[in-house]
């Protein structure tokens, strides 16, 4: 579950959805994920730059404390929101 969430964090970052990306990264950021998803380092650095260290840390901490079920629900909600925004732009 962690590697797909790391990828989702990257997608959300590219869509400009920085806060949800930081929250998801907080859950997904483990030594295993960093070894299987080398882009995590750059993603976290970018989110820290865009959001500031304090905001990034706060959001990442929220993600760290989520249960796997809560994280999955949050991720699905963020996917739905991003999809709706993209569909609105395409219309």
Image: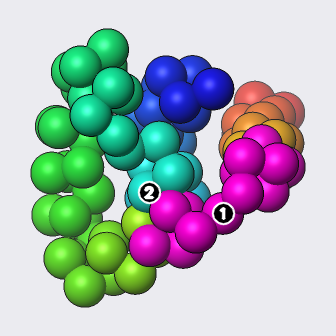
Asked where in the image residue 18 lies, by quadrant, the reply is: bottom left
Compare residues 29 and 88 and report the one nearer the observer.
29
Specify whether 42 is left or right of 19. Answer: left
Compare residues 27 and 13 and report the one nearer the observer.
27
- The residue positioned 27% from the left and 34% from the top of the image is 31
> Which numbered disc covers residue 26?
2
The vertical placement of 79 against 69, above or below, is: above
Extent of the magenta region: 61-73
Q: Is residue 48 visible?
A: yes
Q: Which residue is mark 1?
A: 66
Q: Is residue 15 visible?
A: no
Compare residues 15 and 29 and report the one nearer the observer.
29
Residue 40, position in %: x, y?
Answer: 27, 34
Disc 1, disc 2: CB below 8 Å? yes
- Report if residue 65 lies within the magenta region: yes
The vertical placement of 16 against 30, above or below, is: below
Query: For numbered disc 2, what is the local secondary structure?
Result: helix
Query: For numbered disc 1, what is the local secondary structure?
Result: loop
- Identify the mark nearer the N-term, 1 or 2: 2
Residue 30, position in %: x, y?
Answer: 35, 40
Give me the C-alpha separation between circle 1 and circle 2: 9 Å
Specify whether 31 is left or right of 86. Answer: left
> Which numbered disc covers residue 54?
none
- The residue positioned 33% from the left and 26% from the top of the image is 32
- The residue positioned 75% from the left and 30% from the top of the image is 90
């Amino acid at each position: 579950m962690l590697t797909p969430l790391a990828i989702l964090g990257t997608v959300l970052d590219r869509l400009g959805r920085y806060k949800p990306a930081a929250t998801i990264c907080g859950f997904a950021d483990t030594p295993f994920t960093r070894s299987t998803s080398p882009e995590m380092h750059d993603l976290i650095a970018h989110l820290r730059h865009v959001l500031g260290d304090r905001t990034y840390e706060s959001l990442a901490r929220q993600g760290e404390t989520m249960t796997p079920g809560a994280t999955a629900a949050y991720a699905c909600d963020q996917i739905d929101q991003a999809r709706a925004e993209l569909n609105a732009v395409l219309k």
